[in-house]
Amino acid sequence: MCGIAAVHDFREDPTGERTAEASALGESMLSRLHHRGPDGTGSRQVGPTWLGHTRLSIVDLDGGQQPMPDAHRHRWVVANGEIYNHDELRQQLGGRFHTTSDSEVVLNVLGERGTAGIHDMRGMYAFCVADEDGEVVLGRDPLGVKPLYWARHDDRLLIASELAAFPDEVRHRVEEFPPGHHWTRQGGLRPFVDLRFNPLGGDASPKPVFRSREKARAAIREALVRSVRDRMMADVPVGVFLSGGLDSSLVAAILATEAPQGVTVRSFAAGTAGSSDLIAARLVAEHLGLEHHERVYTDDEVIEVLPEVVRSTESYEPTLVRSAVPNYLLAELAARHLKVVLTGEGADELFAGYHHLRELDHEALRDALTSGVETLHHLNLQRCDRVTMAHGLEARVPFLSREMLAVAQRVPIEWKLLGEDGQEKTLLREAFHGWLPDEVLWRRKEQFGEGSGTTDVMARQAAALVPDEDWESVRIEGLPPARTREELGYQRIFDAHLRGIRADQVLGRFATP
């Protein structure tokens, strides 16, 4: 939920003129994040720090406005995301709470436990907390489900949820705030969790690998059910993105089982006419009794939304863009009906679902899976966040809870290799025997862009994107050389986005001759 921006002045006792400049700068940055929070906007000067927030109302619809103060109105927070265990933390912390918003818990955790307490928060989040004395605390969730960027400029620290929020003259200095870290003026940047060796953090000790497949299956099932249950936390309806593949279908099945009596879960699928994703999603939705919605799109619609997709994802990586197109169209459909959806992101990184992992030996596979989890924040999670928030829709990722990650790390690496029949993610499928029709439970992996039919569309249109015959000699300042004509087309859109050129103006460059 939401977009955040902040401007912190490093100078001692900044003048009124500098404070006014910071406020104007912050408001300009915040205006570029309106799509992330169409339900409201708020800002406040807190000591030398300006805080801004655009709100997507999901928890405490009436009392969750931000910036939000602590009980003494000394410390204020702007936060993006959800703290799923906020009720549990409230009971532990005691103290005074004025709202039922999960974001208020951030203030109380820092007030009672300091930055050491950040690892106690379970969820997806990026936040900035500032107090009247000039202290600032930044934090981002361990896997980087929610985005956060920062840059230093003119003795100020600028913070925002997306690259495009930063002024033109600053963008070349913008860096991604690392997941699983917090920052303060006094302590600098520090990690608060180690995903490789202790994803649960704190005093929890890593448990040994599973000795039996039966215990592994039970632990996987229990962890995923709990993760879905936690991510149903909302004061608004929660739906599901349903591709008909294993991962999203399992999330849909658990969501349907856990939904309150009398509540019908809404599911959403997208693809070209006759695509395998649409066919499989219909089967799953009918089996689970879901209220199913489809977005069937054409080649022309793919090309039409492409500039907006690149702009939204803030990436020009071809594989990411191809999967982002159906995701974008899917989010557009879902946003007409609700504000929160669950997705199947992350299962392939935990249980070796990708085709390119098929030929790896034990050690290489272990390294590849670890790297895959650690880089999700600027690949699939970046796509997932941006294309949904472009439509004011929040996506939640049950497979990427820290508890689920800890369970997956206890699975012996050889159990993640292909089965005798060449089937990937066999253990995960076995864990949910009987939850789905066999033709879905054992459906082979397809990338979102492939199953939806979008990859074929992009392949047919690649030449039209970049008609230059000498495309290999084209260079865009600040970007690496494009590997393909398709990637060059995306780079041009990305570059135009950061320079503030509207998507509809860019589209004309890529019209088919």
Image (cartoon, grey):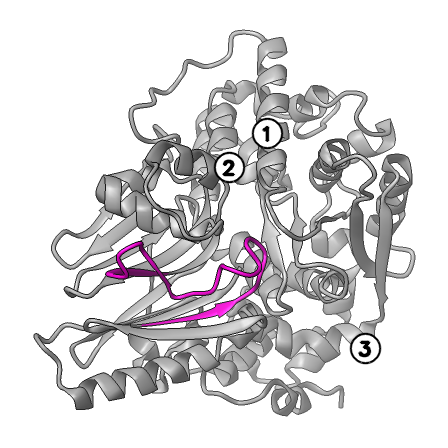
Looking at marks 2 and 1 on the same chain, the residue that comes earlier in the sequence is marked by 1
Q: Quadrant of residue 136?
A: bottom left
N-term mark: 2 or 3:
3
Q: Is residue 13 left or right of residue 118?
A: left
Kindly report the distance in space between the C-alpha atoms of the residues bearing marks 2 and 3.
38 Å
Q: Residue at x 68, y 91 (%)?
A: 508
- The image position of residue 333, as x and y in percent, is 77, 64
Please name the residue that numbered disc 3 is placed on: 300
Q: CA distance from mark 3 to mark 1?
A: 41 Å
Magenta-colored stretch includes residue 63: yes
Give left or right: position of 48 versus 389: left
Element carrying mark 2: loop
Instruction: Estimate the spatial distance between the alpha carbons at disc 2 and disc 1, rounded to whole Å.
Output: 9 Å
The image shows residue 462, relative to residue 289, as above or below, that is below
Residue sitting nearer the eye, 165 or 498: 165
Query: Residue 401: which disc?
Result: 2
Q: Main secondary structure of the magenta part?
A: loop
Horizontal side of 478 relative to 1 (left or right) equals left
Q: Which residues are magenta?
A: 51-77
Residue 43 among those drawn in magenta: no
Which residue type carries mark 2? Ser
Mark 1 = which residue? 226
Please name whichever residue, 456 or 240, is drawn nearer the observer in this view of the structure.
240
Mark toward the viewer: 2 or 3: 2
Q: Quadrant of residue 322?
A: bottom right
- Residue flagged by tag 3: what amino acid is it? Asp
